[in-house]
Image (cartoon, grey):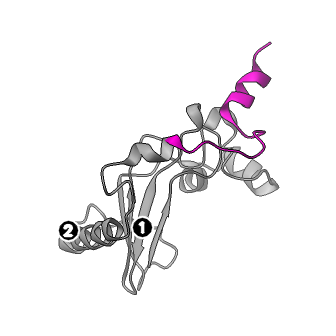
Amino acid sequence: MLVGKERHDLGRPNDAGYPVRAMRTPEYLYVRNYEPDAWPAGNPETGYRNVDDSPTKTLLISGFDKYYRMSFGKRPAEELYDMRTDKECLNNLAADPKLAQVKRKMLERMEETLRGEGDPRMLGRADFFDTIRYTGARKHSYDEWLKNIRP
């Protein structure tokens, strides 16, 4: 199974998305985060706009450090989870040298499949996603957040 995301909500400057692709087999989940320096749930200063407000969100961002990082923290460029022993995906094995070949094969298979399907990111045209403008209500946008904090 392949999954991916480019854009979802507007909590970043220039409405930038969080590009990620993943592949799941019965044994492993491989995740490739293409912008590991970005915040996957939106920027902290905008209140993580990619996550709906709720009592749980309020609790997590108010000081539960381990769970905060798991929910809102930046992600490494690569993640690999053994689905047979870690169904909750808590133990990232991407740096384990014993699984380097598994990780490499999953990345190659994922990107080969995505190229075959015409994924612009795999075809060197990731900037295509920046040409698509958001047309819905902009209440979560970075620009709207800036308007509200400036006098």
Q: Say which residue label 1 marks.
A: 22
**Which picture quadrant has residue 30?**
bottom left
Q: Nearer the viewer, residue 23 or 130?
A: 130
x and y percentages locating residue 121 in the rendered image: 37, 54
Do the numbered discs 2 and 1 sit on residues whose CB atoms are within 8 Å? Answer: no
Q: CA distance from mark 2 to mark 1?
A: 16 Å
- The quadrant the N terminus occupies is bottom left
Residue 100 is labelled as 2
- The quadrant the C terminus occupies is top right
- 93 on left or right of 15: left
At horizontal 27% and vertical 73% (from top left) the residue drawn is: 109
Q: Earlier in the sequence, mark 2 or mark 1?
A: 1
Residue 50 seen from this side: yes
At horizontal 65% and vertical 48% (from top left) the residue drawn is: 9
Tag 2: amino acid: Ala
Secondary structure beneath disc 1?
Answer: strand
- 5 on left or right of 115: right
At horizontal 18% and vertical 66% (from top left) the residue drawn is: 97
At horizontal 74% and vertical 46% (from top left) the residue drawn is: 136
Point out the residue furthest to the top here.
Answer: 151
User: Is residue 78 on the magenta stretch?
Assistant: no
x and y percentages locating residue 49 in the rendered image: 69, 44
Q: Nearer the viewer, residue 130 or 34?
A: 130
Image vertical order of residue 126 relative to residue 27, above or below: above
Secondary structure beneath disc 2?
Answer: helix
Tag 1: amino acid: Ala
- 148 on left or right of 135: right
Q: Which residues are magenta?
A: 131-151
- Mark 2 neighbour density, 10 Å: few (under 14) some (14–19) many (20 or more): some
x and y percentages locating residue 28 in the rendered image: 37, 78
